[in-house]
Image (cartoon, rainbow, N blue to C red):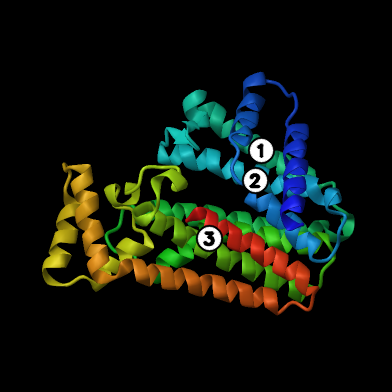
Amino acid sequence: MMREEISTYLQWIEAEIIKQNRGGTPKSLYEAQRYILALGGKRVRPLLVALSYRLYKNDILRIIPFAVTVERFHNFTLIHDDIMDEAPLRRGKKTVHEKWDNSTAILAGDTMLVKVYDQFLNLEPSILTEALTIFNAMALEVCEGQQTDMEFEKINRVSEKEYINMIRQKTAVLLGFCMEFGALLAGAKKQDQVALRELGINIGIGFQLKDDLLDVYGNSNKVGKKLGGDILSNKKTFLLINALSKAKGKDKDILKTWINKKKFDSKEKVAVIKSIYDKLKIRELTEKRISEQFDVGFRSLESLQLDSHKKEALKKFIVGLIERQS
């Protein structure tokens, strides 16, 4: 039954995305927005809003416009992130700034953010202030996380604690907001809203760590990208940070040599660093931390005094997302 429900929710979400993005001038400004939203993705964020709401109420269609608002915000961040990263592709297609130009991309993203606040004005007055308060807090952290991530590129040492906090801000707090927002829309108790926010944040951290892991150890066909990109760019992931911390002697020298090399054979670099990860059991360490993050999140879910079948359905959906990443 859950799979059928998810399919229905996705149909509603896609229909609402189209509805919210019709027309508009200048034409290029709105075409750019429709383009990024049409690139797809799993629509995890609006689904989490809907599934959190479903824990309390069944009239899901009523809140789909607000769930889609979260997807709009997410794609606004992607447009701007791609500009900052000078990324040529997003989900295998040209990024907005490549297909149009930087100015159009910036304005398309800005307009999407304005539309988010526009949609919030349709919320019931009794929850409008609270919704804006938690949304603004989340959006601020996303910006802080992105800036921290960029600053990490310019410094030599990043601790595991600093990295976890960065991905919490840049990625996980948005998932936390989705779950908290769904509960708020349903009129749930404040303690339930907080518990669901913590669930979202912990699974968000887990998903990002899994993404780090799959960049090295994943199946390229399933992951949808060439493996080893993080290694080639010396990205300070959970894996590299722990390898640098644990490596000693010759292994540490080899790691530093490859990190500092300006010219190298890509396949050789990935193979050498992966072999050091294997030797130091970095994969197992990462898998353990991922499991811990999801366990903490699921404990938050179990703490809710709600229908056990609905809680189990939400857990199954999250577990399904984990498995599809593998």
- Please name whichever residue, 146 or 44, is drawn nearer the observer in this view of the structure: 44
* Crowd class of label 3 (few under 14; some 14 to 19; many from 20; radius 10 Å): many
Q: Position of residue 37 (x, y in %)?
A: 63, 36
Mark 3 is on which residue type? Answer: Gln
Label 2 sits on residue: 73
Mark 1 is on which residue type? Answer: Met
- Please name whichever residue, 55 or 129, is drawn nearer the observer in this view of the structure: 55
- Whether residue 235 sits left or right of residue 9 in the image: it is left
Q: Position of residue 300 (x, y in %)?
A: 65, 75
* Crowd class of label 1 (few under 14; some 14 to 19; many from 20; radius 10 Å): many
Mark 1–mark 2 CB contact (< 8 Å): yes
The answer to whether residue 141 is above or below residue 229 is below
Mark 1–mark 3 CB contact (< 8 Å): no
Mark 2 is on which residue type? Answer: Phe
Query: Can residue 205 be seen in the rendering of this structure?
Result: yes
Mark 2–mark 3 CB contact (< 8 Å): no
Label 3 sits on residue: 169
**Label 3 secondary element:** helix
